[in-house]
């Protein structure tokens, strides 16, 4: 069965610091990978996704993620965070074939202090 | 399209009562997911449907939970009887098999007292 691990449950950064959130998945087949963001009191929104091609994916608001197949990883990065990036970040995976079950990690809460 | 619409947004109920959460998916999107979000467990997949058919309900915690999708425009998640530990935010998400992105509703915050 698929599973997604996010190693950092809580991250606290100052504005302008660099961000990297870890995500590892377990699944032997071809996958689609996602990062979703949930701002306080809101629903989940897609930040970026990978399904094929260039393993370095750029998303909205200056976020990017790199798919490293050999490490089963899809880490999220941002070179300089802002206070408005305070949110919870979820990594997710779905199979690329068959029934497309979407499985999420437990999330990472990011707090950016001004 | 108004996106995925969930109702109610907030529900407070007493232990033992029946609770029904509703979801109106995006027209034409053939996958529908129900998730539960708690502080302790994060976002858990409860059940998902494809073309109104339940595909995997292994995430449904107990027999007290049931979900239906009688047609492509409507799905319900029912808890009977409800318990305080069911308190959580329940999200409905929708996806087109031809696309990779899932779209989430605003969620229903359930509090069982």
Image (cartoon, coloured by chain):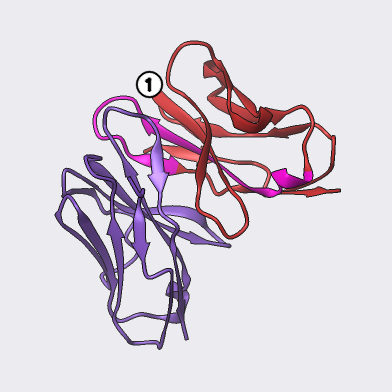
**Is A10 rendered above or below residue B22?**
above
**Is A53 rendered above or below residue A90?**
above
**x and y percentages locating residue A63 in the rendered image:** 65, 29
Is A87 positioned to the left or the right of B29 in the image? right
Q: Which residue is mark 1?
A: A30
Examine the image and state in which quarter residue B67 appears. Answer: bottom left
**x and y percentages locating residue B61 in the rendered image:** 35, 64
Does residue A102 show up magenta in the picture? yes
Q: Quadrant of the N terminus of chain A?
A: top left
| Residue found farthest to the top | A53
Chain whose colour in the figure is red:
A
Is B86 positioned to the left or the right of A22 in the image? left
| Residue found farthest to the front | B1
* Dot 1: element: loop
**Is A42 rendered above or below residue A65?**
below
Is A62 positioned to the left or the right of B22 in the image? right
- The region drawn magenta spans A83-103
Residue placed at 37% from the left, 30% from the top?
B100
Q: Colour of chain B?
A: purple
Q: Is residue A109 visible?
A: no
Residue placed at 62% from the left, 57% from the top?
A40
Q: Is residue B59 visible?
A: yes
Is B15 positioned to the left or the right of A36 in the image? left
Does residue B108 show up magenta in the picture? no
């Amino acid at each position: 069965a698929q599973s997604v691990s996010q190693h950092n449950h809580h991250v606290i950064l100052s504005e302008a610091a660099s961000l990297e959130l870890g995500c590892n998945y377990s699944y032997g087949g071809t996958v689609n990978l996602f990062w979703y963001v949930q701002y306080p009191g809101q629903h989940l929104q897609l930040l970026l996704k990978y399904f094929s091609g260039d393993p370095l994916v750029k998303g909205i608001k200056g976020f990017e993620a790199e798919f490293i197949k050999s490490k089963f990883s899809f880490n999220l990065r941002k070179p300089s965070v802002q206070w408005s990036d305070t949110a919870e970040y979820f990594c997710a995976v779905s199979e690329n074939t068959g029934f497309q079950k979407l499985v999420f990690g437990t999330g990472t809460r990011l707090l950016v202090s001004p | 399209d108004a996106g995925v619409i969930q109702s109610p947004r907030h529900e407070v109920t007493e232990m033992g009562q029946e609770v029904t959460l509703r979801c109106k998916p995006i027209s034409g999107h053939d996958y529908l997911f129900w998730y539960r979000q708690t502080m302790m467990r994060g976002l858990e997949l409860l059940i998902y449907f494809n073309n109104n058919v339940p595909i995997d309900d292994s995430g449904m915690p107990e027999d007290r939970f049931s979900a239906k999708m009688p047609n492509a425009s409507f799905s319900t998640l029912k808890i009977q009887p409800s318990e305080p530990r069911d308190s959580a935010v329940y999200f409905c998400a929708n996806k087109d098999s031809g696309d990779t992105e899932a779209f989430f509703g605003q969620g229903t915050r359930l509090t069982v007292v």
